[in-house]
Amino acid sequence: ELGTLKNIPLEGVVSVAQELKKKTSFIPGPKEFSRGGGKSIASILSQMSPDAADQYLEQILADDPDLYAEIKKHFLSFEDLLSMPEHLMSVFWRSPDIDVDELAKAFKGTDESVVNNIIKHLPKRKQSMYDEYKQPLSKKEINKSQLSFVHLARAMHQREDINLDDVLSSNEDLIE
């Protein structure tokens, strides 16, 4: 009977349509599922402490260099910020959001030549304000300070102040 619409009254069609509309509101919408890959692993690693993430990355590098290369396209570490290309350094480290005291904490235990290279990119006023952090710091506090700069870099990338793809692609070059 439904095959011949001419014989069905219009009220019946409207009634069925309303019932179907009510019932379809309970059907869940489409969901996007991830099957893993470098981006998924990078998001998991970014939630870990930097030391734990480094250990996992070292193990992945030993087990599957191709997966490691894919992860490094999406994973940003504090060390990446220290070794990014000069044109990005001059933009990132001149950001008004850079806190010199946090920077001193983040640099605790870092090679002096690397520190000096970063400091030269700071604005003159912040260069004069920078003072090496001499008090003892726990590894957790250092990691927290370093992560604050990673988060700042990601925020600047979202605002399109810098392009992290350049930093992450330079990681790719280091693997080969």
Image (spheres, rainbow, N blue to C red):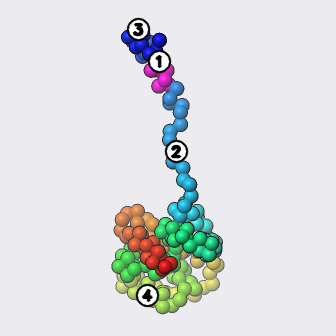
The residues tagged by marks 3 and 2 sit, at their Cα atoms, a distance apart of 40 Å
Amino acid bearing label 4: Asn
| In this picture, residue 94 sits left or right of residue 38 | left
State the residue position of label 3: 7
Question: Which stretch is magenta?
Answer: 15-22
Query: In the image, residue 102 lies at what x, y percent?
Result: 51, 77
Q: In the rendering, which numbered label is found on residue 31? A: 2
Q: Residues within 10 Å of mark 1 (few under 14, many from 20)?
A: few
**Is 36 inside the magenta-drawn segment?**
no
**Is 17 inside the magenta-drawn segment?**
yes
State the residue position of label 4: 117
Which residue is depicted at the point 42% across and 10% down?
A: 8
The residues tagged by marks 3 and 4 sit, at their Cα atoms, a distance apart of 84 Å
State the residue position of label 1: 16
Q: Residues within 10 Å of mark 4 (few under 14, many from 20)?
A: some
Choose the circle earlier in sequence order: 1 or 4: 1
